[in-house]
Structure formats: structure tokens, C-alpha cells
Image: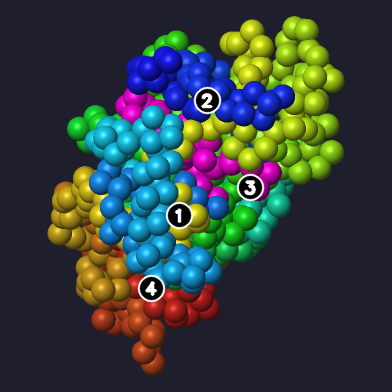
């Protein structure tokens, strides 16, 4: 028998003889570099699809190939359940008490049974605790939960960072990222925005394009400010205020501001920044297995996050040198909704681009689904490997056959024999069809090194995260400079009242920002600026005098909102006022009275 411990060869299982329904002794070793032409795993619930995917990712991590795995169901967190000692106490925290009760056992007895089951199962496939230890030592497994603190949260503060120069210099790539980001953000607000006809899409896309083209990043706060006071006055050949009047822009700004202010959205702003390089490697260059659990998100939030993630991965890919070897893997456990055959959600465009371009840079994309009728098979024409398990309906089988015939590339395709093989597949038995192999093969998947405990609950994810290595502090967290202030002269807001977002004001209340007077982090405080040209003339005395007076007054919610008698006189050139705040500034609380123009 061939030794399966070969670098660059993924041990997936053993050959399976369909006529005799028996497993053979020869190993199925998948060439890692074949994965640069991508793969798709198709199989109904109970077919063993998750086990095959977990086994594939284990092999990659053992070979020190980093992985980003998107987990919509909660199963892939099991990659972190690695017990080299195979002791009952290792399994005990992860067994389901209900399963133990159904089996007529205590939880301790059931854990001991599971430990024996895993030990014997591994031995039947030539594996043991030492191989689990190799897997454990090769890479850390981290479970990320965007929008939740159950696992390690991912911050979207950098989600609208300017893409790298390689993307900015490619007009098509830049527009692709702008459109995808805009569509997903507006979908989060419940706005079904068409890139051509939607004025919301046109405005937000222009704001992103304008900033990114100059290499400037935008966060949600900056985007809200840009919607109120865009850095351009025309859209196409028409005035911006005609296409999108200030009052209507205010409504959109308020929607974004309400999203940002919602308590549930604050968890999206916590944690490590969304960064592909960080997801793939730790600060010491060690490869990582990053499992991104999105099971807790609703459909709009999933699409929003997936679009940002795919955009960032695509930008990372375009900064890498070309290679013929496998550099990293992107695994999506359930593709439903992200690459449908008819509609075009923002994720679809990005996935199709990755399938076409990522192979030259060593990124292997693996897509898994139990719903083959929901896949765009034209998009999968760029997929070199198909793993096909047991299918549920005749319609599913017909769609898979259509896809296989499409990727045969003009090679002889025995449709009848293929249909017969697929119809006879059992649990954990898969058909492997690869453009790199002379003929399809059937195989049974090996026993996984990870304990497959089933979908993880939030509490279980918390337990895994508590045992994982602590994240390296980011620059923003490592150094928190003391706040200085802009030269407001109107007093300082309490630091407890500060916010990271500029206040949203109606279009009839103009908003400007005083230039800072010293270096350091900025805290803007609300004041009212009054400017008057005062003239005095006396013909009898022959006196003519004209002076400009500028006063600055605080504003509050007391009986007298604005008291000019108590205002402070300042020396300031109106031309020095700035249209937008500086990046990274904080903002003092704005009294509600200041948001109404009639109070001035």
C-alpha cells in the first residue's frame, strides 16, 4: 500500500468498488495543486459531505496550507475539536446529553463510547492520535463570528478601506468592488438597489469610487458625512441636487446613521479588522485555519458580510505573485443563495471572478452545496474537480449531469455509466471527477481527525474561543492616545458622550469643522458660529468704519438655546473652515435643539 503521508497529497479516503459495494485498500491521494482549479462538493444531507469537507481542510492544514472556511450551519467549528490523547474527558464537554439519554447512557458513558469510536475509527483508516497531534501543531483554528461576540468578532471599521493599488489601477476591478460593496450595504438597509436606476446606489457608489480612486478609506461615519455633503456637485451631466435633493439624501443618511446607532450593530464594529492576510497567517507567519461562522446572521447580513469578505479576498489575490502551487483555500460550506443560476446578487459576481482569476495566484476555491439546482453551472465551468455524493431528487441528478457534461471539455462523456454510478452512491461514498485525471473514480471518505460533534451552539463556540490563542493587538488597540480637541472655544464634551460618527444634521443646517490647532486625536464639540460685517458711518465727523465680527457660542437644551451675549469673539478666516472632519476623530454630544434650523 502507498504511504499517505506525502507532502502535497491530500489523503481523502480509499477506493470503493461499486459492483461489490466494498472498500478497497488503495488510498485516494488528491494532488494539492489540482485544487488551484477549484472544486465543488455536492451531496444531500446525510451523504457525508461535511465529513469530506472537514477531511479535505485537515489535509490542507497538516501541509501548512492556510484556510478560510465560511460556515453557514455551524459544522466547521468542529475542526477545532482535536484530541490527540483520545481520552473520554476530552470528548465529555462536546457530547450532547440528549444523545446520551437516547442511547440509554450517562453523559460520561457516552463520552467514553465516543472516544473509543474515534480511536477505532481512526485505526481502521491507518490513523492515530499522533496524526491528530501533527494536525494540532501545524495550524491554530480560530472561530470568527461577525456581528456576535460568541467567537472572535470581526470589525467592519476597515470594511470600506481603499483597496490596494493593484485594484485601484484596474478600472474594471475597482468598479466591480465598488458595485458589490454598494449593493450589499444598501441591501442591509432593505434597499433593493439597481446600479443603473437607483439614485441611492449611484450616490454611494460615486462616494466610494471618489475616495478609493484617491487612495482614501471610508468608514460608515465618513460615508454618512459624504451623503450629506458629497465632494462632487454633479452626477453625470446633471446637478447632484437635481438627481438626489438634499432632503432625500438626509433620509438615506439617517437610515445609515440609525443602522450605525443600533445596539445590535455595535458588535459589527468590535474585534479584529476584516483582513484576508490576517485570516490566513498569524503575526509570526504560521498558517491559520479561520472558520467564519455566519449561522447567527439573517440573509441580508450574510450577503453583506460575504460581499465584504469576497471583495477583500479578491483584493488580496491580486496582490500576490503568480504560482502553480496551492497557496491557500477558501471553503464555503453551503453555497445556497450566493451563486444562483438566474439572479445576480453581489456575491455571485465576486465568486465568478475568483473562479476565473484566483487559480493563477494559488488560491483554491472549494464550494459545497446540497442544492445543485441552485447553482449557476455556467459559473462552475471553471471548476476542475467535482466531488458528487448521494443526491435526493431526479432533478438534482439531472442538474449534476448537465454540469459534468459541461466541464468535460469535449472529452468522451459516458452519460449512461455516469448516471448509473451516481444513482448507486451510498453514505460517505463519493464520485471524484477531475479534469486532471483520466477517468472518474469512486471512493469512501476517511475518518476525520476532528471530532464531528455536530453544529456548534454559541456557548460551545465561546468555549472553543476561550481556549484559542489570544489575538495579537492591533495598532488601534495597542495605542490609545489621549484625546485633544479641535479649537472650539465652546467647552469640552464629556468623554463618555463622545461618538465616532459625525452628527447627522438636516440639509438646512450647514455644518463645518474647525481646523485642528495641535497634533493628536481630535474631539469635535458642537458650537454655533456667527459672522457679521458691522459698518459705522458718521458724515459730520468724517468717520467710516467697517469690521468683521465672528462670534462662537455653545448651544444647549436649556430655556435659552443660544445666548449671543455670552458668546466668545474669535479671530478666524471663514475660508479656513473645513467641509469634512479629519479621519479618526471623535464627536461630542449634539443637543437635540441644535438639529432644528428654526432655533437659530
Using the image as rendered, state which of residue 483 and residue 395 is in the foreground: 395
Of mark 4 and mark 2, the one earlier in the sequence is 2
CB contact under 8 Å: marks 2 and 1: no
Is residue 188 rendered to the left or right of residue 589? right
Residue for point 34% across, 24% down: 63
Residue 14: mark: 2
Of mark 4 and mark 1, the one earlier in the sequence is 1
Using the image as rendered, state which of residue 274 and residue 159 is in the foreground: 274
For the residues marked 3 and 2, what is the alpha-carbon distance in whole angstroms? 19 Å
Q: Please rate how many residues cluster around mark 4, counting C-alpha atoms within 10 Å: few if below 14, some from 14 to 19, many from 20.
A: many
Residue for point 38% across, 36% down: 123
Question: Is residue 466 on the magenta stretch?
Answer: no
Of mark 3 and mark 1, the one earlier in the sequence is 3
Residue for point 66% across, 59% down: 190
Pinpoint residue 587: horizontal percent, then vertical percent: 32, 64
Residue for point 38% across, 85% down: 557
Residue 453: mark: 1
| Disc 4 target residue | 590
Pinpoint residue 453: horizontal percent, then vertical percent: 45, 54
Q: Which of marks 4 and 2 is in front?
A: 2
| Disc 3 target residue | 46
Amino acid at each position: 500500500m502507498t504511504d499517505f503521508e506525502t507532502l502535497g497529497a491530500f489523503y481523502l479516503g480509499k477506493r470503493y468498488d461499486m459492483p461489490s459495494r466494498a472498500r478497497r485498500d488503495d488510498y485516494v491521494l488528491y494532488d494539492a495543486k489540482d485544487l488551484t482549479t477549484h472544486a465543488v462538493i455536492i451531496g444531500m444531507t446525510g451523504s457525508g459531505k461535511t465529513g469530506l469537507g472537514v477531511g479535505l481542510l485537515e489535509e490542507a492544514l497538516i501541509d501548512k496550507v492556510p484556510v478560510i472556511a465560511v460556515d453557514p450551519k455551524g459544522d466547521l467549528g468542529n475542526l477545532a475539536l482535536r484530541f490527540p490523547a483520545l481520552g473520554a474527558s476530552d470528548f465529555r464537554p462536546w457530547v450532547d446529553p440528549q444523545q446520551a439519554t437516547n442511547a440509554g447512557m450517562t453523559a460520561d458513558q457516552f463520552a467514553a463510547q465516543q472516544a473509543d469510536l474515534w480511536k477505532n475509527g481512526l485505526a481502521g483508516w491507518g490513523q492515530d492520535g499522533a496524526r491528530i497531534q501533527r494536525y494540532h501543531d501545524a495550524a491554530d483554528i480560530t472561530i470568527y463570528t461577525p456581528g456576535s461576540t460568541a467567537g472572535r468578532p470581526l470589525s467592519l471599521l476597515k470594511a470600506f478601506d481603499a483597496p490596494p493599488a493593484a485594484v485601484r489601477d484596474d478600472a474594471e476591478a475597482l468598479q466591480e468592488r465598488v458595485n458589490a460593496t454598494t449593493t450589499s450595504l444598501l441591501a442591509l438597509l432593505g434597499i433593493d438597489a439597481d446600479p443603473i436606476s437607483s439614485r441611492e446606489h449611484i450616490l454611494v457608489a460615486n462616494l466610494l469610487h471618489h475616495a478609493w480612486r484617491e487612495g482614501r478609506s471610508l468608514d460608515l461615519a465618513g460615508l454618512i458625512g459624504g451623503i450629506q455633503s458629497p465632494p462632487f456637485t454633479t452626477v453625470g451631466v446633471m446637478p447632484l441636487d437635481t438627481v438626489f435633493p438634499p432632503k432625500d439624501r438626509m433620509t438615506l443618511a439617517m437610515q445609515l446613521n440609525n443602522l450605525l446607532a443600533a445596539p445590535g450593530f455595535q458588535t459589527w464594529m468590535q474585534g479584529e479588522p476584516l483582513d484576508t492576510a490576517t485570516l490566513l497567517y498569524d503575526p509570526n507567519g504560521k498558517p491559520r485555519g479561520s472558520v467564519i461562522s455566519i449561522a447567527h446572521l439573517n440573509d441580508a447580513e450574510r450577503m453583506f458580510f460575504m460581499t465584504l469578505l469576497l471583495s477583500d479576498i479578491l483584493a488580496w489575490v491580486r496582490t500576490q505573485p503568480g504560482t502553480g502551487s496551492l497557496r491557500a483555500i477558501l471553503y464555503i460550506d453551503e453555497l445556497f443563495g450566493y451563486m444562483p443560476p438566474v439572479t445576480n446578487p453581489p456575491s455571485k459576481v465576486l465568486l465568478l471572478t475568483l473562479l476565473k482569476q484566483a487559480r493563477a495566484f494559488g488560491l483554491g476555491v472549494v464550494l459545497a452545496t446540497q442544492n445543485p439546482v441552485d447553482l449557476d453551472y455556467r459559473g462552475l465551468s471553471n471548476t476542475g474537480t467535482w466531488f458528487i455524493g448521494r443526491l435526493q431528487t431526479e432533478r438534482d441528478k439531472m442538474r449534476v449531469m448537465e454540469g459534468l457534461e459541461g466541464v468535460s471539455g469535449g472529452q468522451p462523456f459516458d452519460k449512461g455509466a455516469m448516471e448509473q454510478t451516481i444513482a448507486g452512491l451510498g453514505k460517505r461514498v463519493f464520485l471524484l471527477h477531475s479534469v486532471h485525471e483520466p477517468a472518474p473514480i469512486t471512493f469512501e471518505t476517511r475518518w476525520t481527525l476532528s471530532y464531528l460533534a455536530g453544529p456548534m451552539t454559541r456557548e460551545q463556540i465561546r468555549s472553543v474561543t476561550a481556549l484559542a490563542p489570544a489575538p495579537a493587538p492591533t495598532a488601534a488597540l495597542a495605542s490609545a492616545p489621549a484625546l485633544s480637541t479641535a479649537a472650539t472655544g465652546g467647552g469640552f464634551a464629556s468623554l463618555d458622550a463622545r461618538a465616532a460618527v459625525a452628527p447627522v444634521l438636516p440639509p438646512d443646517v450647514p455644518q463645518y469643522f474647525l481646523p485642528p490647532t495641535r497634533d493628536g486625536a481630535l474631539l469635535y464639540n458642537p458650537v454655533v458660529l456667527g459672522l457679521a460685517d458691522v459698518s459705522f458711518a458718521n458724515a459730520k465727523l468724517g468717520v467710516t468704519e467697517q469690521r468683521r465680527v465672528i462670534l462662537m457660542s455653545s448651544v444647549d437644551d436649556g430655556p435659552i438655546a443660544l445666548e449671543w451675549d455670552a458668546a466668545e469673539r474669535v479671530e478666524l478666516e471663514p475660508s479656513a473652515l473645513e467641509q469634512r472632519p479629519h479621519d479618526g476623530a471623535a464627536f461630542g454630544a449634539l443637543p437635540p435643539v441644535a438639529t432644528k434650523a428654526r432655533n437659530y
